[in-house]
């Protein structure tokens, strides 16, 4: 049932037919100032759109992706840019296919949806793998620190270029929820409905510890070389280990047990003394190695650093959640906040904090907890749990 | 209050006066067969004893240490063997000083207490750093896999050598609890009272994942070299990362916040791109690096592998917990099982499983949950929570 289409008319949607392509907004000649104080000489923004923007530009939705996602949220993307092997994976179906399309949670018959790859990313937006125009080499270790406020600034520039003034909605799961909340607070007049899913206001100590472990796993890889590894072997096992550390917080442990295949695969390349014991270990190692094929370690470091430092109040420059959401109230934004009861990446208490802040500021907020046995990943897997409320929030 | 002596007469105990020394039982000429099928040509067992064995040998207690502990549980150990730098740390007070001494939980005026460093250890018992008599080189990568049943076999040989037939009690916290339970099941006629603290019957999936991450952290260190690193730099950052990954499961997160010092220390050796952000990260890195000074990565791998594979039924060769404890019931063993309510290394559910198995087999069992804000580490820090019940269980 989890993956069943939500409404009957989408049942036979052929995703391959829904061809989309990566668009690139080039702002190469405009220096981009970052919250850190660093300045990028220019940026390119890789993005996709779905649906048609109406004449008064009132039907646009901004979607923000999760940690390891991309702008390719839905459809079939036949483009294979020069950026290399990483892109091939992107030919696969988008990460939110079940939530986007005619009649789905984000109805492409009604809305014009935009999703951009994050700054620092590895799917087309300027990131550590991009060539630094000043040196003619990949940025690598020289790529600066990125904050959530920088993502919001980039998204706003993209909306400007697309001629979108006020969004019908901003929506994002997980790390995308952090960006969504910051967008709403930093651009209070530019969005009506705000939908963070399984997200938070400030990164918890537990997550900061888990993210720090992942940083060390990558930095201690024999091939990391401080981040300048593009000319040689990549820090694959460090990145795989990082992915494994995070994966257990995304997926319910019972699900790992179910997903783990029967056979135990040895990994002679990775493991010297140790013999893989069971299907859990084999499954986790497989997850880690699969991820390495589609992601860049430097991008991963930038995005988890951004996540680790996230504190919505600091991004916006205020002292309390009430102050954070004050302008959201003045602009009559409405929030729909989703919690997942089995989430142990972003715990339900964190969404309760969001809602408490919204209520203190006088923002209209609806808080929905979905009950799932899938943990944090529910937001990818169970459209039926989210679609009715998203449809309702976007119904007028 | 946590560290206050339990009874008044121990208040002024000068630990430095309680001099103990490492004893070594040499069984170098007796091949030691392991559960894995491998055979060590001979072993040495490093151990300490406290108190005096009475004439009929009826007052002996076997103590089993935790993952990173040693035989040096209490007192002041002035010995500084040739084994090297690792030992210097052992001059410090023992890991269970607050639980051992006149009038304490393990009363040295009444009992003769024995604690041995584990096989595969780095504190004197034969382990990966020991010289393989066949090659004249340190075992390193060639040191075999060790199981809990092997530790029990080694402990039984030590008791034989000391002339101890039946123990008054076997006690151990954490991984030491696993060894304690296995000892009781494998030697049902050799122990009267069995006290596992914050322990379990079978390693959980969550712990197996967390232990696997630690294994990969060490194996992917640039200096690991498959385990043969004794002639060069050691895999220090891999071991430090492993310690950090485990540390967060031992200590309550609030305690990490309290313990973290004010200053943020950079670690230029370890970290290239990344800048340490906060006192949590600084504290965790410090914990990891401190640990590296006193522990050997190969030993760590062997012991966490042993822990990861632990299933009391498999160690003993039976199919159910009821069967496991059947002979314990026949020999009228009594169990005292401790849970810590805030433990998220060995969850209270795990101790409930132990007790359910004991009750099914008809073993007399008392189950005590201590309420603590210190998490798993409570067993090191809060003697008052455990001492009355331990005294009671050992009172006859």
Image: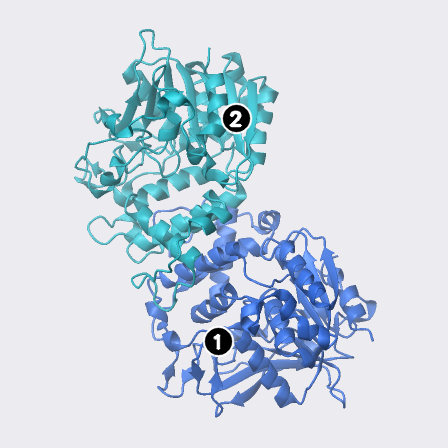
Chain colours: A cyan, B blue
Q: Say which residue label 1 marks.
A: B120
Most foreground residue, A371 or B253: A371
Relative to A108, A1 lies left or right: right
x and y, in percent, of residue A189 in the image: 44, 14
**Nearer mark to the viewer, of 2 and 1:** 2
In the displayed image of the protein, which residue is found farthest to the bottom?
Answer: B29
Residue in the picture at 32% in, 38% down: A144
Q: Residues within 10 Å of mark 1 (few under 14, many from 20)?
A: many
Q: CA distance from mark 2 to mark 1?
A: 52 Å
> Residue B198 occupies which quadrant of the picture?
bottom right
Q: Position of residue B16 (x, y in %)?
A: 67, 75
Residue at 53% over, 89% down:
B26
Q: Which mark is residue A2?
A: none
- Residue assigned mark 2: A337
- The subunit carrying tag 1 is B
Q: Position of residue B226 (x, y in %)?
A: 34, 69
- Residue furthest to the top: A56
Label 1 secondary element:
loop
Image vertical order of residue A341 relative to residue A273, above or below: above
User: Left or right: where does residue B314 sit relative to residue A1?
Assistant: right
Picture quadrant of residue A267 = bottom left
A183 or A95, which is in the foreground? Answer: A95
The residue sitting at 47% across, 65% down in the picture is B292
Residue B66 appears in the picture as rendered: no
Graded by Cα atoms within 10 Å as few (under 14), some (14 to 19) or many (20 or more), the crowding at tag 2 reads: many
In this rendering, the answer to whether A356 lies above or below B111 is above
Do labels 2 and 1 touch, CB within 8 Å? no
């Amino acid at each position: 049932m989890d993956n069943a289409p939500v409404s009957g008319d989408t049942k036979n949607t052929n995703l391959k037919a829904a061809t989309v392509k990566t668009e690139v907004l080039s702002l190469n000649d405009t220096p981009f100032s970052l919250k850190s104080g660093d300045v990028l000489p220019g940026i390119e923004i890789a993005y996709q759109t779905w649906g048609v923007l109406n004449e008064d530009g009132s039907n646009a939705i901004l979607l923000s992706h999760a940690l390891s996602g991309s702008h390719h949220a839905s459809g079939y993307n036949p483009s294979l840019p020069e950026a290399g092997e990483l892109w091939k994976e992107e030919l696969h179906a988008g990460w939110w296919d079940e939530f986007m399309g005619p009649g789905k949670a984000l109805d492409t018959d009604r809305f014009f949806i935009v999703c951009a790859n994050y700054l620092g990313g590895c799917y087309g937006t300027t990131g550590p793998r991009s060539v630094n125009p000043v040196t003619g080499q990949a940025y690598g270790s020289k790529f600066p620190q990125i904050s959530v406020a920088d993502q919001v600034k980039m998204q706003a520039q993209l909306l400007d270029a697309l001629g979108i003034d006020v969004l019908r909605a901003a929506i994002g799961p997980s790390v995308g929820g952090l960006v969504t909340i910051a967008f709403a607070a930093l651009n209070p007049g530019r969005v009506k409905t705000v939908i963070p899913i399984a997200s938070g206001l400030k990164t918890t100590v537990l997550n900061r510890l888990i993210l720090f472990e992942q940083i060390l796993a990558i930095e201690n890889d024999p091939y990391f070389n401080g981040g300048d590894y593009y000319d040689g072997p990549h820090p694959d096992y460090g990145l795989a280990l990082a992915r494994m550390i995070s994966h257990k917080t995304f997926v319910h442990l019972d699900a790992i047990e179910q997903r783990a295949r029967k056979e135990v695969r040895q990994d002679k390349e990775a493991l010297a003394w140790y013999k893989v014991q069971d299907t859990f270990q084999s499954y986790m190692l497989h997850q880690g190695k699969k991820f390495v094929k589609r992601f860049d370690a430097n991008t991963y470091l930038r995005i988890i650093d951004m996540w680790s430092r996230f504190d919505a109040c600091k991004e916006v420059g205020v002292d309390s959640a009430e102050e954070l959401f004050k302008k959201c109230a003045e602009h009559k934004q409405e929030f729909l906040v989703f919690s997942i009861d089995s989430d142990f990446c972003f715990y339900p208490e964190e969404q309760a904090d969001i809602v408490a802040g919204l209520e203190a500021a006088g923002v209209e907020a609806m808080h929905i907890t979905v009950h799932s046995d899938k943990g944090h990943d529910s937001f990818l897997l169970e459209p039926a749990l989210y679609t009715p409320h998203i449809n309702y929030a976007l119904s007028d």
